[in-house]
Amino acid sequence: MSLTSEPAPEQGPSVSIEARQKMVRRRLWAICFALFASEIGCFLLIFPWIDAWTLNHLPGMLPPFLIEVQDVWDDPLLKSAVSALGAINVYIFLLQVLSLFRKK
C-alpha cells in the first residue's frame, strides 16, 4: 500500500443502473411473451371444439365450386391440429414461466 494508490474498489456484486434496467426490461418482455403464449394457446386449444367454430361465414364468401371447404373446416383432424398448436403454445408458456423463476 502506498500513499498514492487509488482506493480499492468495493467488494461484492455491483450492478450498474443500465444493466439493472436492461434486466428489468428483459423480464418484462419475457412476462409479456408468456402471457401472450398462454392466451393464444388456451384459445387455440378450446375454440375449435365449441359451436362458434362451425358457425362461420366462410362458405358464404367462397365461390360455389369451393363449398367443400366447409367439410374440411368441420373435420376433426383439422380441429385436432389447431388444438395441437394451442398445446404447443401452452407448453412454451410453461417453459417461459419456469425460466423466469429459475433466474433470480
Image (tube, helix red, strand yellow):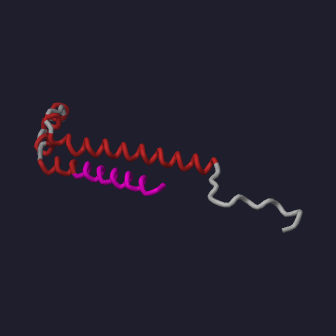
5 displayed left or right of 49:
right
Based on the displayed image, in which of its 4 quarters is residue 12 positioned? bottom right
Q: Is residue 59 above or below residue 77?
A: above
- In screen coordinates, is 45 left or right of 102? left
Q: Is residue 66 left or right of residue 19?
A: left
Is-magenta flag for residue 49? no
Between residues 60 and 37, which one lies in front from this camera angle? Answer: 37
The residue lying at 16 percent from left, 31 percent from top is 60
Q: Is residue 94 magenta?
A: yes
Place of residue 53 in the rendered image (x, y in percent of width and height, measured from the top left): 17, 37
The picture places residue 43, in percent across and down from the top left corner, at 25, 41
Q: Is residue 24 above or below residue 63?
A: below
Q: Which residues are magenta?
A: 84-104
How many marks the image carries: the answer is 0
Q: Position of residue 59 (x, y in %)?
A: 15, 35
Q: Residue at x 18, y 42 (%)?
A: 48
> Which residue ends up furthest to the bottom in the rendered image?
1
Q: Position of residue 103 (x, y in %)?
A: 46, 56
Say which residue appears at 62% left-offset and 53% top-offset: 15
